[in-house]
Amino acid sequence: NAGVTQTPKFQVLKTGQSMTLQCAQDMNHEYMSWYRQDPGMGLRLIHYSVGAGITDQGEVPNGYNVSRSTTEDFPLRLLSAAPSQTSVYFCASSYGVGNTEAFFGQGTRLTVV
Amino acid sequence: GDSVTQMEGPVTLSEEAFLTINCTYTATGYPSLFWYVQYPGEGLQLLLKATKADDKGSNKGFEATYRKETTSFHLEKGSVQVSDSAVYFCALSGADSSYKLIFGSGTRLLVRP
């Protein structure tokens, strides 16, 4: 019953460092996405993927890269961390189009100093 | 573009009180509507959903009705419990972007014994 697994749960970075947030799902879902959660702003979509090899930008993609080489994995890369990227990041997956349930990971709390 | 507006929190209630959290949306076409709940330290979980006008979603004593005429999807519960304390997010997936969720800013509910 793993569902959507995110690692790490917590991370502190220095400005300018790079890192990859990992996301894996074991439900054979085609759709995966990354959101960031900031106080008073809900969740905002960073990038999403509708299948292996296919990715696209969401609402706030700047400073982030993604790739989808397998159905299971959808890593999020921060190329050069900035304090504005301090946030809680959630990965989600779903089986089909919009009226199906999205399953979320437990989140990664990232602090950039 | 599509958007979701929900009432500011926090909402503080005594146990067994009636709960309403307001949610209105702007969208083209016929979106699907969702309520997600986030318990402390966890990811988001689907609470209920409605996919067409006049549908009522329900789960764990919570209900919400898709009102197209007022573009609303208010969350209600007749008698809240301490265990309902969480952050509640209203969300939609649009007809032309059905694999992307658009969230409201979230409403924190605190239920006191």
Image: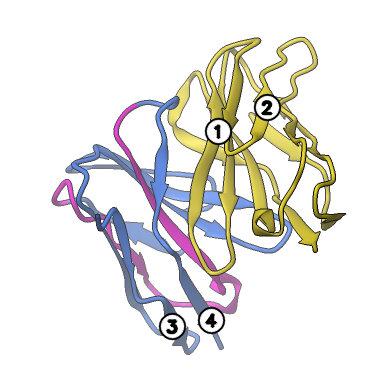
Residue designated by label 4: A111
Q: Which residue is mark 2?
A: B64
Q: Chain of mark 4?
A: A
Tell me whether circle 4 and circle 3 mark residues in contact (CB < 8 Å): yes
Q: CA distance from mark 1 to mark 2?
A: 8 Å
Chain identifier of the yellow chain: B
Q: Nearer the viewer, residue A78 or B5?
A: B5
Nearer-N-terminus badge (4/3): 3
**Which quadrant of the structure image shows residue A106?**
bottom left
Hey, what amino acid is under mark 2? Ala
Q: Position of residue B57 (x, y in %)?
A: 58, 24
Q: Are marks 4 and 2 in contact (CB under 8 Å)?
A: no
- Look at the image and say whether residue A95 sits in the magenta stretch: yes
Q: Residues within 10 Å of mark 1 (few under 14, many from 20)?
A: many
Q: Which structural element holds mark 4? A: strand
**Mark 4 or mark 2, which is nearer to you?**
2
Residue with the mark numbered 1:
B48
Please give the residue where the numbered disc 3 appears in the rendered image. A11
Q: Could you tell me if the residues under marks 1 and 2 are in contact, i.e. CB atoms within 8 Å?
A: yes
On whether disc 3 and disc 2 are found on a single subunit, the reply is: no
Magenta-colored span: A69-96
Q: CA distance from mark 4 to mark 1?
A: 32 Å
Name which of mark 1 and mark 2 comes first in the sequence.
1
Distance of label 3 from label 2 (alpha carbons)? 37 Å
Say if the magenta span includes residue A44.
no
Q: Colour of chain A?
A: blue
Disc 1 chain ID? B
Amino acid type at mark 4: Thr
Identify the residue at image location x=29%, y=53%.
A3
Three-letter code for the amino acid on which mark 1 is drawn: Leu
